[in-house]
Image (cartoon, helix red, strand yellow):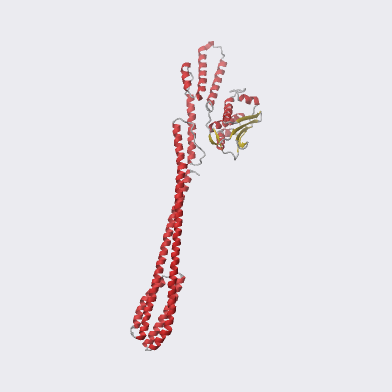
């Protein structure tokens, strides 16, 4: 996962937690408001029901007085019922479930029965049948009051129980909200700490390392390399830095060789050679040798006893020697290894990609086989890459102009402590004496350069503590095996 995706994932997590926190807060507020509204409604229902009971008792008191003394009792009764009816209507409107609506119906029916009894009493009083009215009150009206009282009391108790349920739900909602908010807060703090740790270890530390590497290059340390294993943007920056350092190192080497004088005298060269780096000393000596030979040839002129063809041959040999030295100095003398943890798989792909254009142009087929056990090894990446490139280069030189097959294979053997890299081709091949001679001379019997690359390849392998072997058969091909110790 690249750096952008990591940061987006982290911030997305923080955003989701923030949304969850906000959502839970809104949910808790809404639930709390609903609970408060229900509680207020039930408190009001209970109050209204109490007022209905009290008003009903007060109104029916006028029914008894109508039998005994008061002629205006019926008017006062009807006046009292107005407030009772209004309270009854509000109490019924506040019913919000089926059970409460059923209670309203039952209480209303009992209330209607009482109203009918009261009007019966008033009718008897108007016809001067007060005795019958009094008996009706004692036998019928008082009996009908009992269901009304029982139903209203049951409604009050039901409201009290329902309020307890609402209060319990409110408490449960509060506890749930507190738990979710605590989890969200813990997750937010954890993600913030994780983000801080990630920025410190996976972003700021690599950036500081890049800064330090740039300072080292600015001070002239062109051997400095950064880790290339990361798959994110910082890994791309590290790979770009390594390519830049390699290019600067190669350019410095090229400029250093090009700036060497070709006609230096003994007096001018002694001090300069002593002050030169060891990787340029041999090149300087060969250049001076060629220059002195040219000067001697000019001085001798026509009296020179060396045949012209011999002179040209010597100069050509010196030129080839100069090229060989230039190639050898790419590695320096002595071979100083810059060991680093290197991805062997990436290195093998990189070696083949260097010859991709030639593979295509010459229609050469190649095969790459890498054991899945191979991962990283402690090697000098640049020198090992050049050694493998030299083997592939020699294989291509032994193949026909078009066609041919080349194979590159790697595996781990000998109790997983030896890295084996094999290069094979179906080229012309060679006799074993020719191979031995390639490791000993700069020139093979056919006049083609053979030795410097193979010599340095063998030297690089041996400097790593490994072993290089070549098996070649004329007309069949060549097989090269490199064994390197695995060091982590």
In the foreground, 24 or 294: 24
131, above or below 317, in the image: below
Instruction: Name the residue rendered at 34%, 79% in the picture.
Output: 79
Question: Where residue 208 appears, x then y in whole percent?
Answer: 44, 38
* Left or right of 262, for residue 449: right
* Left or right of 268, for residue 419: right
Question: Where residue 115 appears, x then y in whole percent?
Answer: 40, 80
Instruction: Name the residue rendered at 44%, 33% in the picture.
Output: 215
In which quadrant of the rendered view does residue 430 lie?
top right
461, above or below 184, in the image: above
Question: Where residue 139 appears, x then y in whole percent?
Answer: 43, 84
In the foreground, 441 or 33: 33
Is residue 400 visible from the viewing direction of this image? no
In the foreground, 70 or 80: 70
Instruction: Name the residue rendered at 43%, 79% in the picture.
Output: 146
Question: Where residue 326 appears, x then y in whole percent?
Answer: 52, 25
């Amino acid at each position: 996962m690249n750096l952008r995706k990591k940061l987006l994932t982290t911030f997305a997590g923080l955003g989701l937690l923030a949304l969850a926190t906000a959502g839970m807060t809104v949910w808790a507020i809404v639930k709390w408001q609903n609970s408060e509204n229900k509680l207020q409604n039930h408190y009001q229902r209970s109050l209204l029901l109490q007022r209905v009971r009290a008003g009903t008792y007060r109104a029916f008191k006028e029914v008894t007085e109508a039998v005994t003394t008061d002629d205006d009792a019926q008017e006062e009764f009807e006046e009292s019922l107005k407030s009772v009816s209004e309270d009854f209507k509000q109490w019924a409107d506040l019913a919000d479930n089926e059970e409460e609506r059923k209670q309203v119906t039952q209480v209303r029916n009992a209330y209607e029965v009482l109203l009918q009894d009261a009007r019966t009493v008033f009718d008897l009083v108007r016809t001067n049948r007060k005795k019958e009215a009094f008996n009706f009150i004692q036998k019928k009206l008082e009996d009908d009051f009992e269901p009304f009282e029982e139903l209203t009391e049951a409604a009050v108790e039901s409201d009290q129980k329902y309020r307890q349920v609402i209060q319990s739900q409110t408490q449960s909602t509060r506890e749930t909200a507190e738990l979710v908010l605590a989890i969200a807060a813990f997750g937010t703090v954890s993600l913030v700490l994780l983000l801080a740790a990630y920025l410190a270890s996976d972003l700021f530390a690599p950036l500081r390392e890049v800064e330090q590497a740039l300072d080292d290059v600015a001070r002239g340390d062109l051997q400095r390399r950064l880790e290339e294993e990361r798959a994110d943007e910082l890994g791309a920056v590290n790979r770009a830095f390594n390519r830049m350092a390699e290019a600067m190192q190669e350019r410095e080497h090229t400029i250093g060789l090009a700036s060497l004088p070709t006609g230096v005298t003994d007096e001018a060269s002694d001090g300069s050679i002593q002050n030169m780096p060891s990787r340029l000393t041999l090149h300087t000596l060969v250049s001076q040798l060629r220059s002195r030979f040219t000067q001697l040839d000019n001085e001798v002129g026509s009296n020179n006893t060396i045949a012209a063809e011999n002179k040209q041959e010597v100069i050509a040999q010196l030129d080839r020697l100069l090229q060989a030295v230039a190639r050898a100095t790419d590695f320096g003398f002595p071979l100083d290894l810059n060991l680093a943890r290197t991805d062997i798989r990436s290195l093998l792909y990189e070696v083949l990609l260097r010859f991709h254009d030639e593979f295509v142009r010459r229609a050469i087929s190649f095969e790459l086989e890498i054991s899945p056990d191979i991962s990283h090894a402690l090697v000098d990446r640049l020198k090992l890459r050049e050694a493998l490139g030299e083997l592939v280069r020699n294989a291509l030189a032994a193949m026909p102009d078009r066609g041919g097959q080349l194979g590159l294979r790697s595996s781990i053997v000998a109790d997983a402590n030896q890295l084996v890299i094999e290069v094979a081709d179906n080229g012309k091949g060679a006799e074993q004496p020719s191979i031995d001679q390639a490791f000993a001379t700069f020139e093979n019997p056919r006049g083609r350069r053979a030795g410097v690359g193979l010599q340095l390849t063998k030297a690089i392998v041996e400097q790593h503590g490994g072993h290089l072997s070549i098996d070649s058969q004329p007309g069949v091909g060549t097989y090269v095996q490199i064994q390197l110790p695995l060091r982590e």
